[in-house]
Image: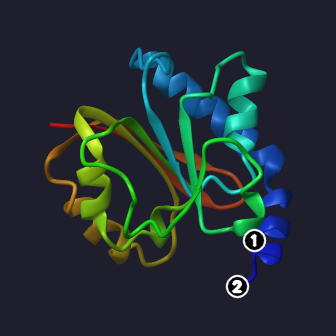
Amino acid sequence: MSSIYFKKIYSSWKILQEKKYNMILKLLNKHRIKFNKKLILDLGCGPFFFEKFLEKNKIKTKNFILLDKDKDLIKKRNFVIADFNYLPFKSEIFDIVFCIDSFHFLNNIHEIKRVLRKDGILLISQFLRMDNSELLKKLKLLDDFKVLDEFLFNWREREIIILLRKC
């Protein structure tokens, strides 16, 4: 699919996304997860809605590395064009990895495990389908992670948000 298609679809979700981002921020605050002095990777950042939301809420995002395959997004600072399945980063470099609406694109779970530090945080936000067997298979591969929290978010689609810590 073209990046124009993705932008059009994703942009139509912006208001709903902000509601979800509020839930994510509350979840992170509940577990006292701070962004300052942390190196953060946003896998599949899209048109930067999450980063803009955080900045609007007075959270600095200069320590975020934004990764997507869409070449039109390259104008943003700290932006990397790469495939999720072959991350161009050193091992155990990130303190936090966000995978918001992009986990279904990830086939090589080992890459998240590789780039996230021990005790690092992984946040997955994934829409649910009628058949969630692929999602369940991927989550089972995160056996060296502890689930800190999870909840279902019902809006246009049902979605699960899972907060994990790498052991």
Relative to 42, does residue 33 appear above or below in the rendering?
above
Q: Nearer the viewer, residue 1 or 129?
A: 1
Relative to 165, does residue 68 appear above or below in the rendering?
below
Q: Position of residue 92 (x, y in %)?
A: 25, 42
- Identify which amino acid the numbered label 2 is placed on: Met
Q: Residue at x 73, y 46 (%)?
A: 76
Q: Residues within 10 Å of mark 2 (few under 14, many from 20)?
A: few
Secondary element under disc 1, as helix, strand or loop, is helix
Please name the residue that numbered disc 1 is placed on. 6
Q: CA distance from mark 2 to mark 1?
A: 7 Å
Disc sitting over residue 88 in the figure = none
Q: Residues within 10 Å of mark 1 (few under 14, many from 20)?
A: some
State left or right for residue 15 relative to residue 53. Answer: right
Q: Residue at x 62, y 52 (%)?
A: 45
> Would you identify the image quadrant in which residue 3 lies?
bottom right
- Identify which amino acid the numbered label 1 is placed on: Phe
Please name the residue that numbered disc 2 is placed on. 1
Q: Residue at x 77, y 47 (%)?
A: 16
Secondary element under disc 2, as helix, strand or loop, is loop
State left or right for residue 30 relative to residue 120. Answer: right
Label 2–label 1 contact, CB within 8 A: yes
> Would you identify the image quadrant in which residue 135 lies?
bottom left
Relative to 79, does residue 18 appear above or below in the rendering?
above
Between discs 2 and 1, the one toward the N terminus: 2
